[in-house]
Structures are given as structure tokens and as C-alpha cells.
Amino acid sequence: MGRRTLVRAVTATVLATSFLAAAGNSAAIAETIISVTDPAAQAAAAREFVERLALHDPRPDVQVSAWNALLSSQGDEAIAEFLATGLAEAKARAAERAQRNTEFIQRTNKYSLPGSAVEVTSARALLGSDIEQDEYVRVGLAKAQQADRDTDNQYQEKLVKMAKEDQDYVSDLAAHDPGVQVRAAANRALSQHNEQAIDLFFKYYWASAASLDDESFRRFTADRDAIWHNDVTRLVEAAEAAEKAERAASGELAEKYRADAIDAWRQVETTAEQSSVDWSAEQAKAVQQVDAWAAIAVHARTATSEQDWADVIARGEAGRTSWAAEAAWAQSQADSWKAIADQARASADAAARDGGNS
């Protein structure tokens, strides 16, 4: 690939590989790394990136804004505008909504009756993800209030007793689960030293904590990759500007511009290589989650306590599938950034050779 085509490939390559990876099409990924270099392909890659946000971003406001851009009659212009300003605005709205929901649930919990469904469910919601808190505000509180009317505010007395098997399993999760939030939730349940806390962990907090781990992974990787992408794009533009200046200059000034271009390409190489390494680390984390959820499903099939193990099996299978997709996505990103590093190295080497032959 020529030196001056890399800036177009940077955006398109990194974005376009995501959905190919999800489909398991490694040959298509390899072809994309080489061929995605034109404006039409960049527009298609940008649309695919927005589709991923619409389908998978954990923030409802981001999802809605992404769908609005995708369905807009303005086509690629709407996509570009969303990426330029709409995404940041949607993130800001999501943060404001999350803050309002948290404050509302805190007030609800503070003034709820002891032992009531409202007290238990609002406390649970405060430990949940943004999506779970939003759902609680919209429908969960009303359901809890109805449960209190049905049980005369004796909700906690209706909880099922745990078996020792359950406590042992929660202890194992607290020590070995790859998810930070799941381990924390399990340890909180154990620290209360009562059956009710373990039962609540199985019924609510486990799934909620797993959702937080999933959201944290997706949010971190999406936001971190955007930083890498911006850094590399800036450096590529600097390298191309130096090359353009070199072609218009001569003598020592041309040599200076060539050195600037080589330095910029080397920085692109270093940044892209680090991005590849970091994505490989994220891929390894996702694989750990795949293995953990597979083991959870296996345990649930042989468990004999009174918990809803059928639901645990379903969550185990769903978690394994979801994290497998994240692992494939992370691997595709690691491969893409490695290809960009290789392209940048080739551009720097070509510029150095040009200088040696001048």
C-alpha cells in the first residue's frame, strides 16, 4: 500500500472488520485490511460502526441516536454528523439520565418500608447497571409496589432458603470468576452471613453484576479504541502533510520534511502496535469469560439446591455466546491494528529509502 493511502485505510480498516469478525469471516477480514481505501468504503465502514453502537452499546440514548442516524433520509451525511457530534451528545444525555435515575432510586429506597419489596428491589437496582436502573424507574418500581400489596409488605419472608451447596458455589465465584463486578457481588453476599443474602445473589445480583461486567468491557473497548483511532489519524495526517511539503521543497528543507514524515510514520507504527497488544489482552479477558460461563452452565445442570438452575443454565449459555462474539471482535481489532502498524512501518521504510536514493 502506498504511503499516502494509509490515512484513508485507517478509519475504514478498523471499523469494517468488526462485523466481519462477528460473522467469523477471517478471509474477508484479511481482504478488508488490504482493499478498504476509498471514500465509499470509509462511508460503509462508518455505517457498520454505527450499526454496532445501535445494536450493542449499553447506553439506551446512544442506541437511539445511532438508530436515528442509520434510518435518516440524509444517508451518509447523517452518519458523519452523528460521529462528529451526535455520539458525544448522546453519551452526555445517557450520563444525565443515569444520574437522575440513581437519585430517584436512592430516594425511593430511603423512604421505603423495612422488609418491603420496594426496599429490596430499590437496593438491588442501586447496584445495577444504567439499563437496569432505567428499567426499574420505568416498570420495576410499580411491580415492587404491587408485590407489597399482594404480600402485605412481607416480601423478604417469602424468599427461598439457601442450601450449603449454594454458599460454597458463591464462595467459588467470589474467588475465581473473571468478572470484577461478579466477584464483588459474591463477596458482598458472603459478607452478610445469612441465607437471604445468598438467595438474593442467585435471584438478582449475580445477573446484574454480570451485566455490569459486560457493559464495562464494551464501553472501555469502544472508548479506548476511539482514542487510538484519533491518535493514529492525527499522526497519519501529519506524516502526509510532511510528505507533501517534501515534494514541494528541495535540498536541506526537503530532507527535514522527509525526516518529519518518517518520524510520524514511526509513531503511527508504535501506537498501532500498542493498540494491537492491548486488544489481544482484551481478547484474552473475553475468552476467560467464555470459559467461565461454559463452566457455570455445566455446574447448573448437576446442581440440586432450590435455586432456579434452569435460569442459570440459560444465562450461562447466553453469556458464553455473547462473550465469544466479544472475543472474536477483539481479535479482529488486534489483527487490524497489527496490519496498520505493518503499513506504517512500510511507509516509514519507503520514505527512508527515498531519502537514501536522493
Image (tube, rainbow, N blue to C red):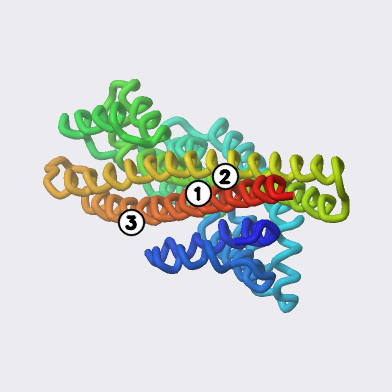
Mark 2–mark 1 distance (CA, rounded to whole Å): 6 Å
Residue 209 appears left or right of 105: left
In this view, the residue in front, 41 or 76, is 41
Q: How many neighbours does mark 1 have within 10 angstroms: few (below 14), some (14-19), or many (20 or more)?
A: some
Return the disc, 1 or 3, that comes first in the chain's sequence. Answer: 3
| Residues under numbered marks 2 and 1 in contact, where contact means CB atoms less than 8 Å apart | yes
Where is residue 53? Give x, y as percent: 57, 59
Residue 119 badge: none
Q: Which residue is mark 3?
A: 321
Residue occupying the point 31% across, 52% down: 320
Q: Vertical placement of 171 versus 306: above or below?
A: above
Q: Vertical placement of 340 versus 49: above or below?
A: above
Residue 153 visible = yes
Question: Which image quadrant is residue 158 in?
Answer: top left
Work out which residue is located at the far bottom of the displayed protein and give it.
73
Q: How many neighbours does mark 3 have within 10 angstroms: few (below 14), some (14-19), or many (20 or more)?
A: some
Amino acid under label 3? Thr
Residue 272 badge: 2
Q: Which residue is mark 1?
A: 338
Q: Vertical placement of 188 versus 345: above or below?
A: above
Residue occupying the point 27% across, 45% down: 291
Where is residue 85? Give x, y as percent: 76, 55
Q: Nearer the viewer, mark 2 or mark 3?
A: 2
Q: Nearer the viewer, mark 1 or mark 3?
A: 1
Amino acid under label 1? Lys
